[in-house]
């Protein structure tokens, strides 16, 4: 059960079409194959996982992006095609070649993606046999169907749109993401596809995507594990004719909207984390350096003891103290103030004189919780989003392959 409400409204992006169908990787006719088509002349940027066991489609996608701007994305769910060696690479290339022949493009203009179980061969024939039926289904209105088609353990699709006026013209950005477990950088276990009708160079897109990823998908954690298939793609179709790159103020306005959209998608992953009953924001403020703030935030967000206490609505602030103390930082603990919501747990490194257990329990019982650590040492701050750790998380992952 996901935490909080979600909107499934979206805006179409001129120059981008998508399709989603079942090809038989997942049982019971569940959609498990998604295709994106982009107008000729589109530009694409990418951020991929840093896991040493990067999946075959990640390796193939990186190579293809170095050669040409893609026209098609081909995404399967239910099978990760990871830890499959040269055979996995060959399987990804076969899928790219099959689509390229049907679509009349070069194989390098197809970027493959996979998500699902690691270590199993990709059922190539199921994918290639479905491609002929997919092409007629391509439509600019199929964003929500695509968001559903890339899901694995997700309980609901993640889709966000932003529209703004830049240089007197309307610009649209729409993005989808999947991810629910095995979530922490670099990047989180997720796939995300974002498109805009703005006109931007590949270099400008890449710079924006890297910056925005650092503030969004690389600030979330469910279980501190980094997957093999993570990919985040940003494509500019240029269909609006509005060249964002020519005017610094226009570029910054676009970037702000992009970052906002990506943060909302990232939060959507945490709200739908495996077994989540609570959405948790961890803020570390007034530090001397961003790195120390981030280290402390992740030490808290990744602590199983804290996450289980949150699940139980137990305001065990000693666990927060423990997590701060184990972080690889050099700080003056006598300056620390710690809060759950508006309730102050610690003041200057010790229990706050006005704190009572009932106050903490009430704050912890909320479905959405903010933990704030004030280092009182500088002007740097970082925020990480996480979830609680429930019985359901254990069940989902214990039964993932059964």
Image (spheres, grey):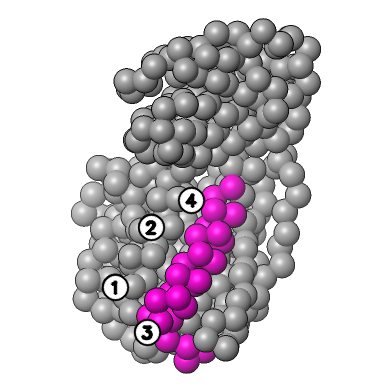
**Which image quarter holds the C terminus?**
top right
CA gap, disc 3 and disc 2: 19 Å
> In this image, 395 relative to 336: left or right?
right
Residue at (55%, 59%) from the top-left corner?
Answer: 260
Note whether 266 is above or below 388 in the view shown: below
Instruction: Name the residue tied to disc 4.
Output: 216
Please say if 273 is above or below 76: above
Q: Tell me which segment is drawn in magenta.
A: 240-267
Q: Is residue 63 above or below residue 363?
A: below
The residues bearing labels 4 and 3 have C-alpha atoms spaced at a distance of 26 Å
**In x, y percent, where is residue 288?**
36, 32
Is 249 in the magenta?
yes
Dot 1: element: helix
Q: Residue at x 49, y 34 (%)?
A: 285
Q: Which residue is mark 2?
A: 211
Q: Disc 1 marks which residue?
A: 203
Depth check: give the residue in front, 24 or 54.
54
Marks 4 and 3, the one that precedes in the sequence? 4
Q: Is residue 5 magenta?
A: no
């Amino acid at each position: 059960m996901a935490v909080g409400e979600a909107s499934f409204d979206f805006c179409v992006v001129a120059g981008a079409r998508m399709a989603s169908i079942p090809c038989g990787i997942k049982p019971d006719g569940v959609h498990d194959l998604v295709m994106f088509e982009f107008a000729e002349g589109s530009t694409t940027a990418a951020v991929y996982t840093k896991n040493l066991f990067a999946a075959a489609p990640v390796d193939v996608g990186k190579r293809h992006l170095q050669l040409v701007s893609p026209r098609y994305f081909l995404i399967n769910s239910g099978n990760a095609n990871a830890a499959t060696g040269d055979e996995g690479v060959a399987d990804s290339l076969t899928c790219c070649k099959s689509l390229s022949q049907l679509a009349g493009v070069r194989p390098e203009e197809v970027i493959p993606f996979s998500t699902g179980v690691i270590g199993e061969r990709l059922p190539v024939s199921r994918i290639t046999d479905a491609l002929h039926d997919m092409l007629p289904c391509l439509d600019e209105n199929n964003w929500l169907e695509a968001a559903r088609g890339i899901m694995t353990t997700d309980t609901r699709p993640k889709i966000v749109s932003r529209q703004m006026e830049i240089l007197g013209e309307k610009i649209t950005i729409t993005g989808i993401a999947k991810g629910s477990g095995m979530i922490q950088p670099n990047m989180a276990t997720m796939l995300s596809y974002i498109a805009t009708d703005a006109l931007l160079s590949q270099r400008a897109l890449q710079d924006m995507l890297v910056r925005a990823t650092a503030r969004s998908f690389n600030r979330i954690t469910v279980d501190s594990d980094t997957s093999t298939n993570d990919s985040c793609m940003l494509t500019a179709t240029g269909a609006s004719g509005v060249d964002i790159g020519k005017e610094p103020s226009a570029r910054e306005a676009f970037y702000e909207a992009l970052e906002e959209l990506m943060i909302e998608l990232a939060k959507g992953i945490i709200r739908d984390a495996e077994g989540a009953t609570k959405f948790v924001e961890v803020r570390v403020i007034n530090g001397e350096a961003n790195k120390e703030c981030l280290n402390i935030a992740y030490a808290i967000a990744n602590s199983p003891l804290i996450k289980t206490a949150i699940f139980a609505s137990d305001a065990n602030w000693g666990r927060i103290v423990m997590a701060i103390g184990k972080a690889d930082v050099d700080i003056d603990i006598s300056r620390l103030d710690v809060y759950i919501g508006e309730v102050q747990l610690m003041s200057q490194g010790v229990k706050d004189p006005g704190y009572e257990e009932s106050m903490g329990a009430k704050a912890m019982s909320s479905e959405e919780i903010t933990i704030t650590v004030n280092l009182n040492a500088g002007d740097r701050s970082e925020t990480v989003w996480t979830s609680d750790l429930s019985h359901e998380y254990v069940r989902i992952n214990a039964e993932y392959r059964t």
